[in-house]
Image (spheres, helix red, strand yellow):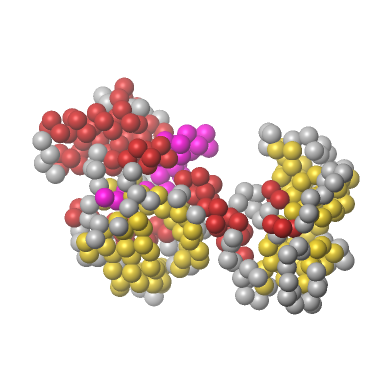
């Protein structure tokens, strides 16, 4: 059963077409992440699902019920906002309980639900404090607590971690993942952060200019992108793109370097393409190469240690690329090395259509 079904949804702001005919079907219990660059329409889509923006055309069903024109309070949703939206004059307990009391729940039920949410989020010791007395991470936990006491069909998250520092974002990602596992409810999560998308999602919906560019599991989009945009958006560090020309057996780079592509047939020799190589698929070359791998001599241009790994910048075919190597593989700029490129994982991109060949 689908908890959310969107059909041919459009949203206009005057002459600006923000959402352009989106179709989306989210099954019960799925964690779906809407991701994309600023201005792609992801927050507008979420706010339209919530009823905070009116639909220009199309339909929205939640739990099998058409809610296209229903008020937010009649959609059986709960929402967590980017700025927490806590009432400063209420303590934590009353903030979490606010929505339940507004809907005239019995006080015994309110107490029970608040206690359960506080226990799940580890904020039981904060119930008498006020928002001004809480850290950013604690405020976000309270905002999530206020949502989960609703026991809604659909939970909506609008960039809830964007105001937190890096360590808190890491911690809260774990909390949200654990919460989804415990609640087993359908969640729609908006972010511009592709790491959040990759780590949280059962399914990623990548938007671009108001349209769905591609959707699928995180691994699907990472390993089988359909366009250059998808290939370049997901992954950290980003995919390297190197101009090349097809040959009968592979590609030739601008400096004449020839790289074989295993298992490829019917290549149109002479066609201009972009060769896509993920930094994770480039390693230091050992004495023996695996089948489908190639060895290329390089000179290291830049070294960026990240702890257990190092991001090394080097030229390939006249273009600077990044390889994610072991911490002790390279030590300084100017160092000569040989890299091992896994060509079985390379992608070819048509330079005219930007689609993967």
Q: Is residue 324 left or right of residue 97?
A: right
Q: Name above or below for residue 327 compared with residue 317.
A: above
Span of residues in magenta: 153-176
Question: Does 134 lie within the magenta span?
Answer: no
Q: Nearer the viewer, residue 224 or 138?
A: 224
Tell me which residue sits at (74%, 38%) in the image.
Answer: 326
Marks counted in the figure total 0
Residue 208 at least partly seen = no
Q: Is residue 193 left or right of residue 22?
A: right
Image quarter where the C terminus lies is bottom right
Tell me which residue sits at (72%, 58%) in the image.
Answer: 344
Q: Position of residue 134 (x, y in %)?
A: 36, 29
Q: Is residue 304 left or right of residue 100?
A: right
Q: Name above or below for residue 72 compared with residue 111.
A: below
Q: Position of residue 168 (x, y in %)?
A: 48, 34
Q: Nearer the viewer, residue 22 or 247?
A: 247
Q: Quadrant of residue 161?
A: top left
Image quarter where the N terminus lies is bottom left
Q: Nearer the viewer, residue 44 or 203?
A: 203
Question: Does 172 lie within the magenta span?
Answer: yes
Tell me which residue sits at (50%, 54%) in the image.
Answer: 217
Q: Quadrant of residue 63?
A: bottom left
Q: Position of residue 150 (x, y in %)?
A: 23, 42
Q: Name above or below for residue 148 compared with residue 313.
A: above
Q: Name above or below for residue 232 compared with residue 252.
A: above
Q: Position of residue 292 (x, y in %)?
A: 77, 57
Tell me which residue sits at (12%, 32%) in the image.
Answer: 107
Residue 45 at least partly seen = yes
């Amino acid at each position: 059963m689908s908890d959310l079904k969107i059909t041919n949804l459009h949203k206009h702001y005057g002459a600006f077409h923000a959402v352009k005919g989106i179709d989306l079907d989210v099954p019960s219990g799925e964690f779906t992440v809407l991701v994309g660059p600023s201005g792609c329409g992801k927050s507008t889509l979420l706010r339209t699902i919530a009823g905070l923006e009116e639909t220009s055309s199309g339909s929205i069903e939640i739990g099998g019920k058409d809610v296209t024109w229903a008020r937010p309070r009649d959609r059986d949703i709960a929402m967590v906002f980017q700025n927490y939206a806590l009432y400063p004059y209420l303590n934590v307990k009353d903030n979490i309980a606010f929505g339940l009391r507004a809907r005239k729940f019995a006080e015994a039920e309110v107490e029970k639900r608040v206690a359960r949410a506080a226990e799940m989020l580890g904020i039981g010791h904060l119930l008498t404090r006020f928002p001004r007395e809480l850290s950013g991470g604690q405020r976000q936990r309270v905002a999530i607590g206020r949502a989960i006491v609703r026991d809604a069909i659909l939970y909506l998250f609008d960039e809830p971690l964007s105001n937190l520092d890096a360590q808190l974002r890491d911690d809260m990602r774990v909390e949200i993942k654990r919460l989804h596992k415990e609640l087993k409810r359908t969640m729609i999560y908006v972010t511009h952060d592709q790491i959040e998308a990759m780590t949280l999602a059962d399914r990623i919906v990548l938007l671009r200019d108001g349209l769905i560019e591609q959707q699928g599991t995180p691994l699907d989009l990472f390993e089988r992108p359909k366009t250059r945009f998808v290939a370049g958006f997901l992954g950290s560090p980003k995919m390297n793109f190197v101009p090349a020309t097809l040959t009968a057996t592979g590609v030739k780079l601008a400096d004449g370097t020839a790289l074989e592509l295993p298992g490829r047939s019917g290549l149109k020799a002479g066609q201009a393409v972009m060769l896509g190589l993920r930094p994770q698929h480039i390693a230091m070359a050992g004495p023996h190469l695996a089948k489908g791998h190639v060895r290329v001599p390089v000179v290291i241009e830049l070294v960026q240690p990240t702890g257990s790994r190092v991001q090394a910048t080097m030229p390939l075919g006249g273009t600077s690329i990044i390889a994610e190597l072991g911490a002790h593989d390279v030590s300084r700029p100017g160092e000569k090395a040989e890299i091992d490129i896994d060509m079985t994982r390379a992608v070819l991109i048509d330079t005219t259509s930007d689609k993967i060949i």
